[in-house]
Amino acid sequence: NMKKFFSIMIAFVAMFTMNAQTFESSRFIDNTYFRVEGGATALTHPGYNKYENWGHTIQGVIGAEVGKWITPKFGVAFEGDFGIRNGSEAGKFNYVYTFVGKEKVHRLNYITVTGLTKFNVSNILAGWNPNRKFEFVLATGPMWICGFPDKGDLNEMDFGVKFKAEVNYNVTERLQLNLIPEFNYKLEDSHWDPCFDSRNSWYALKVGVTYKIGKQFTECPYKYTQEDVDALNEQINELRA
């Protein structure tokens, strides 16, 4: 009887140790989010871009992001940023157009649209935890850039790449606050030739508010098959023998 008792206990332990982290299948809208963000940007090399100093390159930026976490570790997103003209006369980068006989100035300096691949480093290193307050996320992806040059020039369109990190604080299950440092490269020079020059780059620091949509990830227990039961029965029979 004692041997039978220990055999059953060992079998139960084996069943629990076989448990793996699996998640319920979801609808398309589940595990998605919408974010609004704002902050400031500055050029990495002001002098190369005809600005007098670093301070003249600082300008505001507002943006929005829509994304979906495919798994707790991996997600995709689209982000749009709008650079706000800072009014500096040194190296100003704004577009003047005519409307009803009067010249008007674009208040935006540039627009970027970025497709992002995102990695939740916290979940990769420490496993998924629905009660985790702080998360660290890395993201990168290709970027389309539309700048508004001075009067008489055509709008400048280029391609680039964005690298960014996120320090996220989960206020509630739905609401999240974000601190977002990022680095942006323009990958083409003035002749549309490919380049990877830090003089054509800028960095930003933004804060954001994220609202999560749909159902969030729900861990479900491991579903045992007949093969699992047969294997456990075999272990019990071996222990009895």
Image: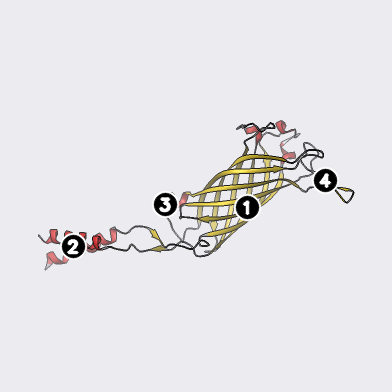
Q: Earlier in the sequence, mark 2 or mark 4?
A: 4
Q: In the picture provided, is 187 more to the left or to the right than 151?
A: left
The residue tagged 1 is: 207
Mark 2 to mark 1 CA distance (whole Å): 56 Å
Q: Is residue 59 above or below residue 135?
A: above
Secondary structure at badge 4 equals strand
Secondary structure at badge 1 equals strand
Q: Image point 54% across, 56% down: which residue?
A: 169
Secondary structure at badge 3 equals helix
Q: Earlier in the sequence, mark 2 or mark 3?
A: 3
Mark 1 to mark 3 CA distance (whole Å): 25 Å
Q: Name the front one of labels 2 and 4.
A: 4
- Front in this rendered view, residue 30 or 204: 30
Q: Earlier in the sequence, mark 2 or mark 1?
A: 1
The residue tagged 2 is: 233
Q: Around disc 1, counting alpha carbons within 10 Å, would you say few (fewer than 14), some (14 to 19), or many (20 or more)? A: some
Q: Around disc 4, counting alpha carbons within 10 Å, would you say few (fewer than 14), some (14 to 19), or many (20 or more)? A: some
Q: How is the image coloured?
A: secondary structure
Give the x, y percent position of residue 180: 59, 49
Q: Amino acid at mark 4?
A: Tyr
Q: In the picture provided, is 194 more to the left or to the right than 229?
A: right
The image's mark for residue 126 is 3
Secondary structure at badge 2 equals helix
Q: Quadrant of the N terminus?
A: bottom left
Given contact means CB atoms under 8 Å apart, are the residues at marks 2 and 3 in contact? no
The image's mark for residue 37 is none
Q: Name the front one of labels 2 and 1.
A: 2
The residue tagged 4 is: 97
Mark 4 to mark 3 CA distance (whole Å): 53 Å
